[in-house]
Image (cartoon, grey):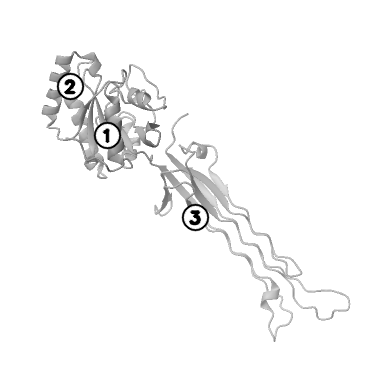
Amino acid sequence: MKFFDEAKIRVHAGNGGSGCLSFRREKYIPFGGPNGGDGGDGGTVYLVGDRNINTLVDFCHKRVFKAPNGQPGQGSDRRGKGGHDLLVLVPLGTLIYDRDTEELIGEVIDHDQKIKVAQGGYHGLGNARFKTSTNRAPRQISPGSPGETRELYLELKLLADVGLLGLPNAGKSTFIRSISSAKPKVADYPFTTMHPNLGVVRVDAARSFVVADIPGIIEGAAEGIGLGIQFLKHISRTGLLLHVVDVAPCDGSDPVEAVKVIQGELVKYGHEVQNKTRWLVLNKVDLLSDDEKQERCQAIISALHWEGAVYEISALRKVNLPPLLYDIMDFIEGKGEEKE
């Protein structure tokens, strides 16, 4: 399925029902008086978080959502039926903007969280409401108020504990396949990942975390080059970033330069993502001999002046993955500081 993280929709709340103009007319009961009932309230539109939805793809097929109107009042002081509220399900991490004012209405973080986006119209009053001591037979009613209509812009930011950074073909997709049940596409050409993938990593029976495979970010991504600009925003929701680097690139490129490219794009993008905790994950060490592995990894660390955590793994062969996963879990639970 294609990943959709933006959508434009229109929401219409229901109109309030008008009041009823009616008089009691029964045999042997003179001067029955007014008995027109009030109308019903119009339905209100809410956006509701649903943990079982991962994308905004449904809004590509349906873009207009309308709550039912309230029914008019009736005689015998009967109130009109109110329109039921309309609940529109959205994935967790959805930000809701008013397209006309560009105001942030709210963001959906929790399952079953409700955010009102369009208020239903209020009911009109029947003529029984206007009866007074001096006006015993009023012919006055009030119409229901119209429901609110809004143009909305929805933006999804993934809710993940860990985000994967790295140039195309760094091995991020292989990594997420090895540690979770997610099955992103893996191939020997760049940009095989065309949309973010979420994977749940279960460390033991009672502990797990969510990792997001962000599509490859290239030089110039912050200015709109390549795919990265569409997904850099997802990084802002993560608590920890793993910078995956291919230590033995088949094209002969420099791993140090690969890291610096991503660092530069994070700084350009801003939003404090460059200040997030970031661990260096040196991938594909199985392609090197022991001596060569030690020499090359140390050269990369020294050239980068890296002061944070460093892990040497092979995502394909699942080498050194358990220690990394347990350290991630401890970091998320606040039990461990950044590894030196």
Query: Mark 2 to mark 3: distance in Å?
Result: 51 Å
Residues 117 and 256: in front is: 256
What's the distance in space between the residues labelled 3 and 1, CA to CA? Answer: 40 Å
243 or 151, which is in the foreground?
A: 243
Corner quadrant of residue 27: bottom right
Q: Say whether residue 296 is left or right of residue 126.
A: left
* Percent position of residue 163, x then y: 31, 35
Kind of residue at badge 3: Lys
Which amino acid, by three-letter code, is at mark 1? Answer: Asp
Instruction: Give the vertical position of 264 relative to 14 (above or below).
Output: above
User: From mark 2 to mark 1, how far is it between C-alphas?
Assistant: 28 Å
Residue occupied by mark 2: 254
Query: Where does the image place residue 284, in percent across and percent down from the top left?
Result: 25, 19
Q: Quadrant of residue 184?
A: top left
Name the mark on residue 116: 3
- Do tag 3 and tag 1 residues touch (Cβ < 8 Å)? no
Using the rendered image of the protein, determine whether residue 56 is visible from the camera's viewpoint. yes
Q: Crowding near pointer 1: few (<14 within 10 Å), some, many (20+)?
A: some
Earlier residue among tags 2 and 3 = 3
Residue positioned most to the front: 205
Return the x and y of residue 69 as percentages of the image width and height.
63, 56
Q: Secondary structure at mark 2?
A: loop
Give the residue type at disc 2: Asp
Percent from the top left, x then y, of residue 264?
Answer: 20, 35
Kindly identify which numbered label has been placed on residue 327: 1
